[in-house]
Image (cartoon, rainbow, N blue to C red):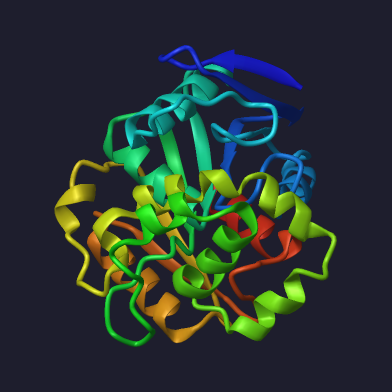
């Protein structure tokens, strides 16, 4: 494990492995560099890239501050990119994809972007996310916050979340549940069933690939296609047989193919 200090003084922990061009991985909600899909993905990509997998603020071995601001998360990513040599490819998944796109629009030295299923909601094809979800999440204890996020945010049926409570990963998700309001804040107005405002990404001039799984729900496929139209020059790809929890073996060749 290595650490870098973000602009506001927050310590950000990261792992580095592999050899080749720098590639930073940005995780989604309830994950860290030790839990979730990115450790396996880092292993898959390490033969082609120098892979940086970091703990977003408030998670794992990274620090945090009392007040959350999306700009601070962008600065965290900037600090990791600086540690990676000053520029890097970036892959973001779920809310991490939303963070990656905001960072690219802010002018960070990102050479290419791969964004997998940022959980935007652009129509009425699923139950709406409550506009109060940031304050709702802040008011809940960790277990209830995870349940709320999974049901109201992601749209999973309640019985699926009940089964998840019996799995070993539930404890790890509760440990980072206090960061769920960060992910909700990060998504902003893009998750309330309205068409995307393309102006927020108008400054992106890097090559961008947006990706969804072939088995992901219809609302998510729709939002990824809409994102592909909203981001200047973006390409779109669908990975057959995969859903939001895409396998490392399925997404790794997509990332490699676009970045080379």
For the point 68% across and 81% down, the residue is 160
- In the picture, measured across the screen, residue 64 lies left or right of residue 15, that is left
Q: Nearer the viewer, residue 15 or 163?
A: 163
- In the picture, measured across the screen, residue 172 lies left or right of residue 148, that is right
- In the picture, measured across the screen, residue 76 lies left or right of residue 250, that is left
Quadrant into which the N terminus falls? top right
Res 260 visible: no
| Percent x, y of residue 129 | 36, 72
Res 191 visible: yes
Quadrant into which the C terminus falls? top right
| Percent x, y of residue 16 | 72, 27
| Percent x, y of residue 10 | 51, 18
For the point 77% across and 54% down, the residue is 171
Residue 1 lies, with reference to residue 38, above or below; the image says above
Residue 211 lies, with reference to residue 64, above or below; the image says below
For the point 75% across and 60% down, the residue is 170
In which quadrant of the rendered view does residue 73 lie? top left
Residue 30 lies, with reference to residue 238, above or below; the image says above
| Percent x, y of residue 118 | 44, 60
Question: How many labels, in total?
Answer: 0
Q: Nearer the viewer, residue 185 or 231?
A: 185
């Amino acid at each position: 494990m290595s650490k870098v200090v973000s602009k506001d003084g927050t310590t950000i922990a990261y792992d580095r492995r592999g050899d080749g061009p720098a590639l930073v991985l940005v995780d989604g909600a309830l994950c860290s560099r030790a839990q979730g899909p990115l450790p396996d993905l880092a292993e898959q990509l390490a033969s082609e890239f120098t892979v940086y997998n970091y703990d977003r603020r408030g998670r794992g071995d990274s620090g945090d501050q009392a007040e959350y601001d999306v700009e601070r998360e962008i600065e965290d990513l900037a600090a990791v990119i600086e540690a990676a040599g000053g520029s890097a490819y970036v892959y973001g998944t779920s809310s991490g994809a939303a963070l990656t796109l905001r960072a690219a629009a802010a002018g960070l030295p990102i050479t290419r972007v791969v964004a997998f299923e940022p959980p935007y909601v652009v129509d009425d094809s699923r139950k709406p996310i409550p506009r109060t979800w940031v304050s709702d999440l802040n008011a809940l204890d960790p277990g209830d916050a995870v349940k709320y996020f999974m049901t109201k945010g992601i749209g999973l049926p309640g019985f699926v979340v009940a089964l998840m409570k019996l799995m070993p990963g539930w404890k790890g998700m509760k440990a980072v549940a206090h960061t769920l309001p960060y992910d909700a804040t990060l998504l902003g107005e893009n998750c309330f069933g309205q068409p995307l405002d393309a102006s927020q990404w108008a400054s992106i001039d890097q090559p961008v690939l947006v990706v969804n799984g072939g088995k992901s729900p219809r609302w998510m496929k729709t939002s990824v296609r809409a994102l592909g139209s909203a981001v200047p020059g973006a390409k779109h790809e669908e990975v057959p047989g995969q859903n939001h929890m895409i396998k490392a073996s399925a997404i790794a060749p997509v990332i490699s193919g676009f970045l080379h």
